[in-house]
Amino acid sequence: MDYIKKFILRGLFGITLGVFINQLVYVAIAMKGNMVQISSDIVILQFIIASLTGLYCGGITIIFEVEEWSLLRQTITHSIAMLPYFPISIYAGWMPESLIGRVFFILNYIIIYIVIWFSFKKYWEKKARELNEELKKHNQNKR
């Protein structure tokens, strides 16, 4: 399957996830018990923004399938490709308006990428060890 088809398929899943997360936020707000009125224009705009953001974020995960690239290069490329999320989140009202809130938001973004990178690094190191062990067993059985 080529990258465009994968982008589309993952993007469609991303739309679903993005809208689901958006709705969870509305449910969390409603569960606080506060009476909040949201206009239909805001709901529709949030739906569109969440859908497009989900499409993009889901689609660009194909970066992690470029086998010629190292995990570090994939992660850096993906984090750079995610930069449009910042102005979108400001426009959508997802990022705090205060400077401290925005700094915290960006630090969380960086920390999440570091955690993802180390998690995947450990995962693939484990997979490589397992494959090497299987190869050793296979080669020993051939003798």
Image (cartoon, helix red, strand yellow):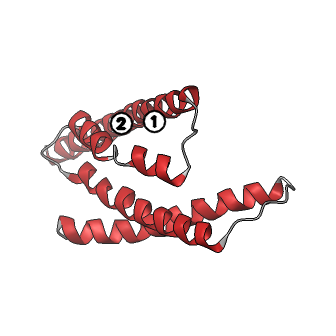
The residue where tag 1 is placed is 109
Q: Quadrant of residue 114?
A: top left
Label 1, secondary structure: give it: helix
Relative to 43, say whether 92 is above or below. Answer: above
The C terminus sits in image quarter: top left
Q: Amino acid at mark 2?
A: Lys
> Residue 58: x, y in percent?
38, 60
Horizontally, is 56 left or right of 40 in the view? left
The residue where tag 2 is placed is 126
Horizontally, is 83 left or right of 16 in the view? left
Of residue 88 and residue 122, the one placed in the foreground of this image is 88
Q: Earlier in the sequence, mark 1 or mark 2?
A: 1
Residue at horizontal 58%, vertical 32%? 98
> Residue 74: x, y in percent?
24, 41
**Alpha carbons under labels 1 and 2: distance apart:** 26 Å
- How many marks the image carries: the answer is 2
Contact between labelled residues 2 and 1, with CB atoms less than 8 Å apart: no
Q: Amino acid at mark 1?
A: Tyr
Relative to 96, say whether 44 is above or below. Answer: below
> Residue 72: x, y in percent?
25, 33
Of residue 18 and residue 124, the one placed in the foreground of this image is 18
Circle nearer the viewer, 1 or 2? 1
Of residue 140 and residue 9, the one placed in the foreground of this image is 9
Of residue 22 and residue 132, the one placed in the foreground of this image is 22
Outermost residue on the right side: it is: 33
Label 2, secondary structure: give it: helix
Local packing at callout 1 (Cα closer than 10 Å; few below 14, some 14-19, many 20+) is: some
